[in-house]
Amino acid sequence: MSQQPVALITGAGRRFGFELAKSLIAEGYLVFAHYNSSRDGVAELEEHGAIGVQADLTSRAAVQALIEKVQAQTQHLDLLVNNASCFFTNDVVDDEPAALAAVFEVHVQAPYLLIKGLQPQLEQTGSAVVINITDIYTDSPSTDYIAYCAAKAGLANLTQSFAKALAPTIRVNGIQPGPILFLPEHDSEHRQKVLAETPLHVEGGLEPMLQAVRFLRDNPFVTGEFIKVDGGRALLI
């Protein structure tokens, strides 16, 4: 009898993480849905069978506690998606030392610790996949978000390093999203500007991201690679 597939998604309470968790649950996965402060989306996921796990990813001790919670409830892990993110302008990180630290703790330190800490569970399946959500600005950084872009570039480097180190039992890939889903605070002028700089001229929505996850999960001969899901915007920035 085949065992139920298990996934851990960080930042599962909203937007892409939430939709991915719902999609995996519908496919029969047991999903560990990580969140930091807001339980709104996670509470809904729990109603469908997910296991909510809280952790402040800026804290190494909290990440270790998260690892131990997962290990206590499963011996194997089929899919790890490092999706959680924090996004600060230069002005914020210049004025708030904690914000500068957070972008590297959330995007580099936490994924590193999760991959290393959960390696035994990932190896148990023999075909596990890690997917790191980076950014199109990894390759062409924005001067308005220097620390954020540097941290995402660090995550991209981790992706390739772990792809080499963990092969052949664990595959590690990344997704670089573009204008997938605007935030509520993005006004009409901002949206029009972004779409004008995107060759396909549309907001992508979350389904293309879900399709990218399925491809990277299901194609057994892809590791250390990145998929841009951006409507071609990386061509113009």
Image (spheres, helix red, strand yellow):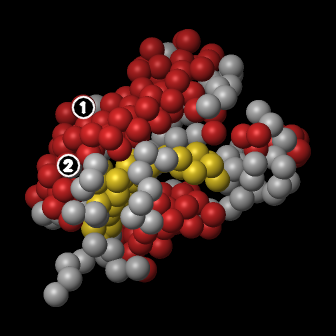
Q: Position of residue 204 (x, y in %)?
A: 72, 59
Crowding at dot 1, Cα within 10 Å, few <14 / some 14-19 / many 20+, comes out as some
Mark 2, residue position: 119
Considering depth in this image, is 108 or 52 the residue closer to the camera? 108
Q: Is residue 233 left or right of residue 193?
A: left
Residue at 34 percent of width and 57 percent of height: 129
Q: Position of residue 42 (x, y in %)?
A: 40, 62
Which quarter of the figure is the C terminus placed in? top right
Query: Which mark lies nearer to you, 2 or 1?
Result: 2
Observer able to see residue 41: no
Q: Amino acid at mark 1?
A: Arg
Depicted 45 relative to depicted 99: above or below: below
Observer able to see residue 152: yes
Which residue in the rendered view is the most extreme toward the bottom?
Answer: 1
Q: Secondary structure at mark 2?
A: helix
Q: Position of residue 202 (x, y in %)?
A: 81, 57
Q: Amino acid at mark 2?
A: Gln
Residue at 27 percent of width and 67 percent of height: 6
Q: Quadrant of residue 12?
A: bottom left
Please give the label number shown on residue 60. Answer: 1
Residue at 47 percent of width and 19 percent of height: 100
Depicted 155 relative to depicted 82: above or below: above
Indicate which disc, 2 or 1, sits on the residue closer to the N terminus: 1
Cβ–Cβ under 8 Å for marks 2 and 1? no
Q: Position of residue 172 (x, y in %)?
A: 38, 49
Depicted 205 relative to depicted 86: above or below: below
Q: Quadrant of residue 1?
A: bottom left
